[in-house]
Image: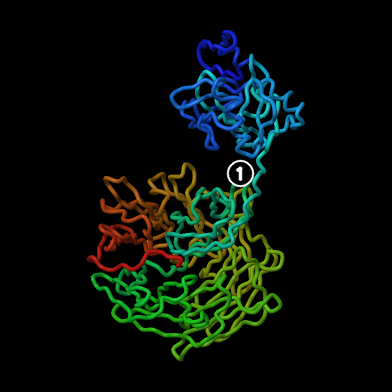
Amino acid sequence: MRFRKIIVGALVQLLAVGAVVVTASAAAQAGSPGTGVPGVTRLCGPDAAYGCTTGGYAGRSTGWPGTKYGAGYASSNQYGYHNCTLYAAYRIAANGAGDPGWSGNANQWDEKARAAGTPVNGTATVGAVAQWNSGSAGHVAYVEVVTSGYIEVTDDNYGLNYTDRWRINVGSASWPDNFIHFKDVQPPAKPPAPATLSALPHGSRVPLRWAASAGAADYLVYRDGLLLTTTAATSFTDLQVSPKQAYAYAVEARNSAGSSAPTTLYVQTRFEAADRVYLRSSGGQAVCGRAGDQSTQTLVCTVGSSTVYTPAGDWGYASDRNWLTNADGTVSYCRRVNYGDQAQCDTFNGTTWTRSTSPRTDLGYGENRAYLSTASGLAVCGRTGDQSYQSLACTLKSPTGWTTVYSPAGDWGYSTDRAWLTDSAGNATYCRRVNNGDQARCDTFDGTTWTWSSSPRTDLGYGENRAYLSTASGLAVCARTGDQSYQSLACTVRKPTGWTTIGSPAGDWGYSTDRAWLVDSAGNATYCRRVNYGDQARCDTFDGTTWTSSTSPRTDLGYGENRAYLATASGLAVCGRTGDQSYQSVACTVHKPTGWTTIGSPAGDWGYSTDRAWLPDGTYCRRVNNGDQARCDTFDGTTWTWSATPRTDLGYPDSFD
């Protein structure tokens, strides 16, 4: 009989040509995988119904594997036959190996294979047969996974009638004696990087979508170098973001051969993508979105109890639709229309919609194109020209009409962190790193003319969490600097007297999951994050000359999902959902001139998780009940108040199409 026994329990008697008794300690000494052997982990099993084996094995006595190792040679139970050699033969046959012309117990496989010219060596490969010579009949298993530190094998067991999956570390006493290469599986190549990565950024959420990669088993999604999730899907929504931030996303495709190069995307949550959004307007909180259908493409905003639709129009290209809040309290929806070379903006003043469309013009490259609400009017700005003439252009809707103005040739800068801003004077500004990456350059458009300025060479900090800010002191590039032993910050600011870089004293960078750069109500650059045990907020503030720091007492900073850092009129705040399903509340921990305080709301409704939003003023908006009502809870620094709309059309959810 051709079989192999693994004994991992009490004394077991197996009947073969003669009676053979093997104890658990003897099995451990035999070297084949078993529980209790250092460096061996049972990943699956024991399973009598073939649940741990792969490749469609079901203990059937068919083909040449069944003839040599099945009926008459294998033991059986109610599910089928069991034999380590039957399983190993089945797997190599499935890989395309024919009858080798010999048969034997597992401890004979190495020598018989060598004699037949089959490679036998100490090199583990996927698809090889792992073979052990110890014991009365030896043992064979099928190699599923090979890494530098371990292998994983699956096996079947004569007599015990169950299957297993084992992980065996390199150096373990249970490492196989040989690997027999009948028909190894060609290892897959690493998958290519996803061809595209797109985002629909909002202040409190960033839906991502990427192209599928051939051969990928799953995808790794990173934000600022932090692994957010591993998913087999080609989409993910990041709910751990704050308004008015910049994030660098990366997606890697992965299979058993490893991970691809990353596909990256720089995202700013200072813009609201086209689909359902929550905005602060002069009439109060507004919920706006696309409505209608392909034949009647409209927009809708609900402010208070009033819902107003636009006339039918054009939703525009899905790649770069945006909602804006304007200085006069109106809200606008801007996008490209027709052939993609015209901008159209619909503006809602709380009562009436108006629409304006630009003439055909150069709206710049899609990457880094931005819609801005400037002092001169709504603007669509982007990179133009080519590598030999790198320029910028803004198409501006002024009271006299639309106009497109180009910058002189310059330098687009590093693609990893280019940013469009509206400066303190309301001008459109494009900032980025240039030259060797240690200089900042900002080009500013005042509605008529472009000007630019570059910093001297300086430390612009780590790329992760680097931010471009419009402060009262001037445009600034702020980031983490130093190292683990001296965790500091620095801002390089463009003052009227020139550029200067000022670093903070050593401190604590905080948890990487939710660090945020803000501009406070006084126009100062501020870096807020959780520190210590994660239940304290710390904010470091730069007023253009000096850094100061403040840390909250230990408190409930809310759940990580939807936690936001905000610059409210009452002070810097960390706001989040608190309580539980039976008492759904929200809370803000705010840094007032008198110190930190945490104030929670009464119990309410967290709302649908797909589109909850914190607004910069400390308001939390979301859909509630049947999803056709919006509720907003507002914190004024002391008290929470809330209001909900009647049931109405809140527009379409996020859509890439």
Q: Residue at x 54, y 71 (%)?
A: 420
The colour scheme of the drawn protein is: rainbow
Query: Between 253 and 490, which is closer to the camera in this rendering?
Result: 253
Image coordinates for residue 345, horizontal then vertical, percent: 42, 80
- Quadrant of the snapshot with the N terminus: top right
Total labels: the figure holds 1
68 vs 543, nearest the viewer: 68
Query: Height in image: 495 above or below 576?
Result: below
**On the rendered image, what quadrant is the C terminus found in?**
bottom left
Q: Report whether residue 473 is seen.
A: yes
Q: Which residue is mark 1?
A: 256
User: Is residue 437 shown left or right of residue 504?
Assistant: right
Q: Position of residue 638 (x, y in %)?
A: 30, 57
Which residue is nearer to you in this view: 561 or 627?
A: 627
379 displayed left or right of 616: right
Q: Secondary structure at mark 1?
A: loop
On screen, 368 above or below 551? Answer: below
Residue occupying the far bottom of the picture: 400
Q: Residue at x 67, y 38 (%)?
A: 184
> What is the x, y in percent for residue 175?
66, 25
Within 10 Å of disc 1 (Cα), the crowding (few <14, some 14-19, many 20+) is some
Residue 505 visible in the picture: no
**x then y, percent, for residue 490:** 60, 59
Tell me which amino acid carries mark 1.
Ser
- Of residues 654 and 538, the one drawn nearer to the viewer in this rendering: 654
